Amino acid sequence: MKLSLRQVLADSHVCAVAIAVLLIWSFNSAVEAIWEPFFGLVSYLITAIAILGLPYIPTQFTFSQRGMLIKSCFLLFNAFICLASAWLLSHWVYVEGPLRSLWNYRERFARGTHA
């Protein structure tokens, strides 16, 4: 009997592992994208508190600030692509969202009814 690719992926661990890895990559890219701007904001607030006023803000971005902005946008785009890939793969194989499919797969794996 010939099985479809969807059925083979649903019966194996490959799809669940791929969805989990894509979700982890998405989370990692999102955190990395907001880390540097968040650190700059915290640094600005600490400086404002230390001098009891507002620090000077240049009117134009510096070269390093432009690089940080480009890097953050790229990482946010990467996070979106990984999340969308996990969602598409999960909906194609399990016909549900990525978190729900991983939760159901975990329950099925704990019962011992995995392939």
Image (tube, rainbow, N blue to C red):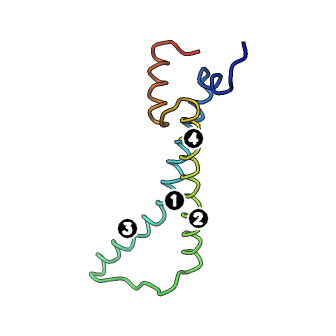
According to the picture, the residue beneath numbered tag 3 turns out to be 42
Tell me the quarter of the picture where residue 21 sits: top right
Q: Nearer the viewer, residue 38 or 48?
A: 38
Which structural element holds mark 2? helix
Q: CA distance from mark 2 to mark 4?
A: 25 Å
> Nearer the N terminus, badge 4 or badge 1?
1
Disc 4, disc 1: CB below 8 Å? Answer: no
> Nearer the N terminus, badge 3 or badge 4?
3
Q: Residues within 10 Å of mark 4 (few under 14, many from 20)?
A: some
Q: CA distance from mark 3 to mark 1?
A: 15 Å
Which structural element holds mark 3? helix
Q: Nearer the viewer, residue 69 or 13?
A: 13
Q: Residue at x 45, y 36 (%)?
A: 99
Residue 43 vertical placement versus 96 (above, below)? below
Residue 54, given in percent of the width and then of the height, sits at: 32, 83
Q: CA distance from mark 3 to mark 4?
A: 36 Å
According to the picture, the residue beneath numbered tag 4 turns out to be 88
Residue 58 vertical placement versus 81 (above, below)? below
According to the picture, the residue beneath numbered tag 1 turns out to be 33
> Nearer the N terminus, badge 3 or badge 1?
1
Instruction: Tell me if 52 is positioned left or right of 72 in this view.
Output: left
Q: Residues within 10 Å of mark 2 (few under 14, many from 20)?
A: some
Q: Residue at x 37, y 83 (%)?
A: 55
Residue 60 vertical placement versus 22 (above, below)? below
Identified by mark 1, the residue type is Ala
Q: CA distance from mark 2 to mark 1?
A: 7 Å
Residue 104, given in percent of the width and then of the height, sits at: 45, 25
